[in-house]
Amino acid sequence: MLRFVVRRLLQLGPILLGLSLLLFVWLRALPGGPAAALLGERATPEAVARIEELYGLDQPWYVQYWKFLVNAVRLDFGNSSKTNRPVVEEMLRTFPATIELGTAALIFAIGIGVPLGYFAARRYGRWLDNLSVSGSLLGVAVPVFFLAYILKYVFAVRLGWLPTGGRQDPRMDADHPTGFYVLDGIVTANPAASLDAIVHLILPAIALGAIPLAIIVRITRASVLDVVHEDYVRTAEAKGLYERTITRRHVLRNALLPVVTVIGLTAGLLFSGAILTETVFAWDGVGRFVYEAIGNRDYAVLQGFILMIAILYVLVNLAVDVSYGLIDPRVRVQ
Amino acid sequence: MSLAQVEATTEAAKVGEEGGSLRRDAWRRLRRDPVALVGFGIIALFVLVAIFAPWIAPYDPADRPGAGIVTPTNIPGPSAEFWFGLDELGRDEFSRVVFGARTSLLVGVVALLLGMAGGLLLGILAGAFGGKVDTVIMRVVDVMLSIPGLLMAIAIAALLGRSLLSVMIAIAVINIPIFARLLRGQMLAQRGSDYVLAATSLGVRRRSIVLGHVLPNSMSPVIVQATLTLATAIIEAAGLSFLGLGSPDPRVPEWGLMLANTQRYLASAPHLAFFPGVAIVIAALGFTLLGERLREALDPKYRR
Amino acid sequence: MSVTEAAADHLLDVRGLSVAFTRKGRRDVRAVDGVSFTVDAGQTMGLVGESGSGKSVTSLAVMGLLPKRGVRVGGEVHFDGDDLLTLPPERMRDIRGRDIAMVFQDPMSSLNPVVPIGIQVTEVLHRHQDLRGDAARTAATESLARVGIPDPTRRLKEYPHQLSGGMRQRALIAMALACRPRLLIADEPTTALDVTIQAQILELLKELVRDSGAALVMITHDLGVIAGLCDTVHVMYGGRVVESAGRRELFAEPHHPYTGGLLASVPRLDAPRGAPLHPIPGSPTDLLPWSEGCAFAPRCPNRVEPCTENPPALESAGGRELRCYNPLVAAEEVPA
């Protein structure tokens, strides 16, 4: 098992390297040159010269690349050209917000998607099945931001049941030691703040999680349909086992394998969707920050954030691979 | 009818499904499938609206017929004169949505073609040559896949500037890995198949085998993927415009951009968000429905 | 003698079993049509037929493993005083695995790939005998040892893909026999295995059944398997039993043309080189209208007029049963 994990980690190496190279090239390909890109509006000739010296932009490309790598490992991505704060600081501020949102969206998608997909499969051809299939087809056709608008309009503007945006009611005046607001409320013994954070999470999480939900329902349903017809399920029935045993040990344990893989893939969707959702719900996360960076031409931020997001994405997929190996013993033998 | 007769007819039906003219069979089934027909109908509607926009829309999308009526607090919704209402600058929403179909179709199709071309090329090279070429190409594909789609699109748009072209290229790049992997998978699967072995042993050159045999046999999943990719391309294009990466020209209506501008007016003028949004959903749905049914029809093993 | 009294005499008493598959908008497919047979304790019974003869469906009907929707089952299946076909599903679940067990054809696909072998054995023990923990593991190890799996303790933690084909089938037999059922149904248990392993598995089955006094129903298309193993044989074609006899009688003197054809079609090692093979012409799925008559008529060398008009009735004579208008050996002509 350990060998499996190590092998997977080693396979990551070339990908991360390729990624960093790509970003490195990208920054230097930006119009105006990298120094101007890093400085944005404050690109005076002196500033540019200083940056060039600082980043060794007059040196051969491989030296620059090496410096870039070294800086990246030390999490030094320079400063935001807009706020002039270190990019790392902005990351620490915004990543927890998005991770919290993404986790909530994933819990929503899996928590509803897997049982729904399972029951749709067991009730093949009946109303729940047809509804689920139709719903998931519709789910992938609705853009995240449109769904976000609809939810916001119906539940926040019209009905007023839920807040229109933000992570927390500013009147709460709560402390945020970890940056994960739900956690913070617990840590600071302020359960009302946690509850408030959860209430603020509901609409954005649903908007963000809708497409992963649709995908998970489909995959779960298809997988359960396949597994239910397998010979080993027939063997289990022939043994006279209780239905719940058969479902748990024989059907689900096999049917959930493809679902685990798909969850890894939806992580990418969550990142992309976060950018759009956070804009609509004024969520102070990575997505919104990147969105604003685009507008501000804040390339230092874009470079650092994109690299970070990609690394995280790769790590999530690694985690998915490893969990797959935990569940499916056949994979470990490779 | 006796048992054997019934068994025999089922056997014959099975053979007909798996071997022989799969496509003709699929075509016949599709023609009768209501969902596929609905999907196709939507696509036809979408294409027609896009092509005949100037004749369908009562106003030019940049015109402001309602400039006198509209104020920041009063943006009229649907009425007899303006079917979808007016936007915040007094422009006819209906005309803008209709012309937006043009933009979406154009971007979607061009992005798809570019992405398919790039992806298929990489996939064929990887699958046909194998070995080191395959490894290198697949590593590149892996790196491309390691960046979430929208992020990649943003990076490309930053590189190429804000225009429809950069949106098209961005979406194309996002989809290259999908087609590359698809075709490579097909090539690998077919490389081991009997007819390829037979042809090779007869001395047929590799290029002929690939172009003349393997490629046509791989077309079915490519067609399916192309249809489904058009759906996602439309949504991705809308998303990129929503973020302000598309054409900065305010006269070119794009559904995503129209949605972006309505943030402020969500409470007072929800129709501004409703119509472009629904348009995106319907267009994407059309391609998705047809694509799904195509997949079921063309893949004999695919069970619903 | 009342019907229930007669039923109690045999371990398994199948009467007029019929299974029809229904589909929307199409005619029913009759997979099993009025099949009857009995099995007694300690007896080995063979069910022979080609694919499509209905032999597997028969066994699934007995076990209650047919799908609930799209299937219509008729007749009676008496076991231990109950008609299995009328039992509520919970009772049937109790009987499966404990009183009647089944072994299937493909050992690789019949095992759950992601669960260790040990658990797949202990779950049966846990379910029917309430064994847990160490007691269950010990019993499981014994089960595996009894079927001839070497080093059974280690095997408990292994997964199906780590075992060879023969060992997987042994494991499946162990799972089936773990609770000492009184009836074991084996559906083509050796078809998916190498020839050398086949013989081993058959020997194993023979031994286990003999030691435990259970009854065995062996379903197969292979006459060689029947010859080595079964006391009585029922030959099935087109969903019906066409001939039943004791093993020796059947092989020495087949009455039904189909049985004769089966026997004649087996290539013999002692035949001269270049001697022609004798297959039965046609295949079970030939498209010919025979719903009114005998299912085998289109392919039968002994076909006469009544064969295509009405299905022949089952006739008993001299401990044998036959469904034929024009058998190979007329019932009267028994050689002295």
Image (cartoon, coloured by chain):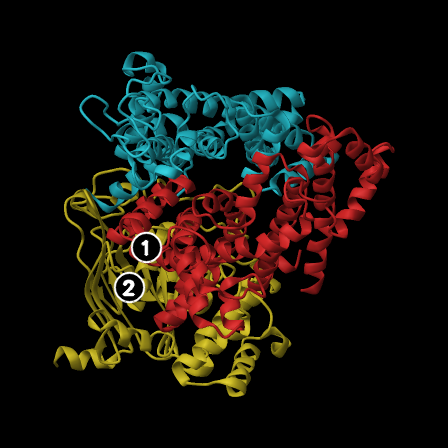
Q: Residue B224 sits in which quadrant?
A: top left
* Colour cyan belongs to chain: B
Q: Secondary structure at mark 1?
A: helix
Q: Residue at x 44, y 64 (%)?
A: A172
Q: Distance of mark 2 from mark 1, alpha carbons?
A: 27 Å
Q: Residue at x 19, y 71 (%)?
A: C86
Q: Is residue C216 above or below residue A197?
A: below
* Colour yellow belongs to chain: C
Q: Measured from the top left, where is residue B97 in percent x and y?
A: 34, 25
Query: Dot 2 corresponds to which residue?
Result: C61
Q: Secondary structure at mark 2?
A: helix
The furthest residue to the bottom: C135
Residue sitting nearer the eye, A249 or C145: A249
Of all chains, the one bearing label 1 is: A
Q: Measured from the top left, where is residue C292 in percent x and y?
A: 16, 45
Q: Is residue C102 visible?
A: no
Q: Which mark is residue C71?
A: none
Q: Amino acid at mark 1?
A: Ala
Q: Residue at x 47, y 67 (%)?
A: C228
Q: Is residue A63 above or below residue A179?
A: above
- Please name which of the two marks, 2 or 1, marks the residue nearer to the observer: 1
Chain A: what color?
A: red
> Within 10 Å of the Cα at label 2, are there few (<14), some (14-19), or many (20+) other Cα atoms?
many
Q: Residue B2 sits in which quadrant?
A: top left
Q: Is residue B265 visible?
A: yes
The furthest residue to the top: B55
Quadrant holding the N terminus of chain B = top left
